[in-house]
């Protein structure tokens, strides 16, 4: 007889949020790609120019073409290349969004260790994303 496993409410909530946010993320990535490649919005760097410099390291690319660095992209949201970049940023933040949703559930169930672990994971991701602790890079 097979043993049946059942997911608890927190696991189902995480899975549901992950499903919706990642599906939305993939739609966002596809839309960003189409907007950039078909140049539906103006871009500082054309797809052809990026393709010509694809072999460069990030630091060299920043010197060769005017791509946003750090948080500079925030001031340029109306550009096609930046919207494409923003879709990748959103998709990479999906895990953090899922954790933020389940933290209150852990807290309500008085599961202190998982609440703390999830909070610490979110804090580490936020610190990494903001570049507050960048090690001089």
Image (spheres, rainbow, N blue to C red):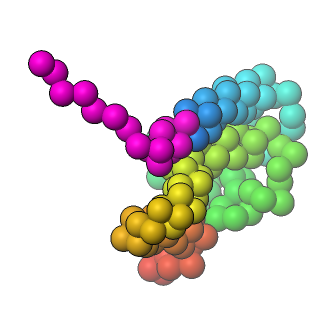
Does the magenta run of residues contain 84?
Answer: no
Q: Position of residue 94 (x, y in %)?
A: 56, 47
Report the residue at 83% width, 54% height from top.
76
Q: Is residue 47 visible?
A: no
Does the magenta run of residues contain 2?
Answer: yes
In the image, taking residue 44 as reference, residue 62 lies left or right, namely: left
Report the residue at 79% width, 45% height from top.
44
Q: Position of residue 28 (x, y in %)?
A: 69, 33
Q: Is residue 105 visible?
A: yes
Above or below residue 124? Residue 46 is: above
Report the residue at 62% width, 34% height from top.
20
What number of labels is visible? 0
Q: Position of residue 75 (x, y in %)?
A: 83, 60
Q: Nearer the viewer, residue 88 or 93?
A: 93
Q: Position of residue 84 (x, y in %)?
A: 70, 39
- Magenta region: 1-16
In the image, taking residue 55 as reference, residue 101 lies left or right, namely: right
Report the residue at 36% width, 70% height from top.
113
Q: Nearer the viewer, residue 10 or 124?
A: 10
Residue furthest top in the image: 1
Q: Quadrant of the N terminus?
A: top left
Residue furthest left in the image: 1
Query: Residue 88 sits in which quadrant?
Result: top right
């Amino acid at each position: 007889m097979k043993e049946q496993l059942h997911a608890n409410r927190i696991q189902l909530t995480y899975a549901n949020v992950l499903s919706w946010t990642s599906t939305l993320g993939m739609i966002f990535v596809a839309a960003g790609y189409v907007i950039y490649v078909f140049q539906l919005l103006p871009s500082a760097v054309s797809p052809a120019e990026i393709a010509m410099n694809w072999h460069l390291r990030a630091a060299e690319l920043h010197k060769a073409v005017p791509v946003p660095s750090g948080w500079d992209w925030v001031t340029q949201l109306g550009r096609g290349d930046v919207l494409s970049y923003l879709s990748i940023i959103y998709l990479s933040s999906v895990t953090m969004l899922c954790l933020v949703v389940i933290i209150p559930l852990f807290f309500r169930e008085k599961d202190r260790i998982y609440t703390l672990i999830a909070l610490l994971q979110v804090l580490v991701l936020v610190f990494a994303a903001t570049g507050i602790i960048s090690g001089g890079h």
